[in-house]
Image (cartoon, rainbow, N blue to C red):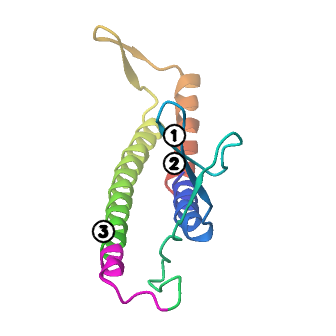
């Protein structure tokens, strides 16, 4: 799960800097402004100038760029976004570690205690059958292998 999240996050970060599409702007009969990748067939549209996303390496995408205050603002925004992403990753890692600790404790309890009691609504307790206990052990092992290694 963690690997999947990291792969997807990386893909989204890289997509913005790789592809800069044409964007067209037009106003329909009701006066609503539209933006799209293709111009409308029935009317004229203005082609918008879209700057490519700033590169992750901190270098400018166009020659001679990087001298203006806009780049400093963009760099500050980029750093802010990166810090937010890093903070989110740290929080998710902390939650994952807490989950893994609880899952390992649960697995140890299931393995060491053949007489596991569970609550069944309204405070009634019942003992797990051996088959149920073994099923929960295998589910816990699978979950730990998927999320904690």
Along the viewing direction, whichever of 141 and 32 lies nearer the viewer: 32
Q: Residue 13 location, x and y as percent?
A: 52, 65
Location of residue 117 (image quadrant) = top left
Q: Residue 107 location, x and y as percent?
A: 46, 42
Query: For the point 51% across and 40% down, which residue is it?
Result: 140
Sequence-first tag of 2 and 3: 3
Which residues make up the magenta segment?
64-75
Q: What residue is shown with label 1?
A: 140
Query: For the point 58% across and 30% down, which residue is it?
Result: 135
Q: Is residue 53 above or below residue 88?
A: below
Q: What residue is shown with label 3?
A: 80
Is mark 2 in CB contact (under 8 Å) with mark 1?
Answer: yes
Q: Is 142 situated left or right of 86 in this image?
A: right
Q: Is 4 situated left or right of 31 in this image?
A: right
Q: What residue is shown with label 2?
A: 144
**Marks 2 and 1, how far apart at CA:** 6 Å
């Amino acid at each position: 799960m963690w690997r999947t999240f990291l792969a997807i996050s990386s893909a989204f970060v890289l997509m913005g800097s790789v592809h800069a599409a044409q964007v067209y702007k037009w106003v329909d009969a009701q006066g609503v402004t539209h933006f799209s990748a293709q111009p409308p067939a029935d009317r004229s549209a203005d082609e918008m100038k879209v700057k490519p996303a700033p590169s992750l390496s901190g270098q400018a995408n166009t020659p001679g760029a990087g001298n203006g205050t806009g780049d400093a603002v963009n760099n500050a925004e980029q750093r802010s976004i990166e810090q937010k992403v890093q903070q989110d990753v740290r929080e998710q890692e902390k939650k994952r570690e807490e989950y893994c600790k609880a899952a390992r404790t649960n697995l140890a309890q299931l393995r060491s205690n053949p007489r596991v009691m569970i609550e069944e609504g309204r405070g009634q307790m019942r003992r797990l059958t051996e088959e149920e206990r073994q099923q929960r052990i295998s589910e816990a092992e699978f979950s730990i292998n998927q999320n904690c290694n």
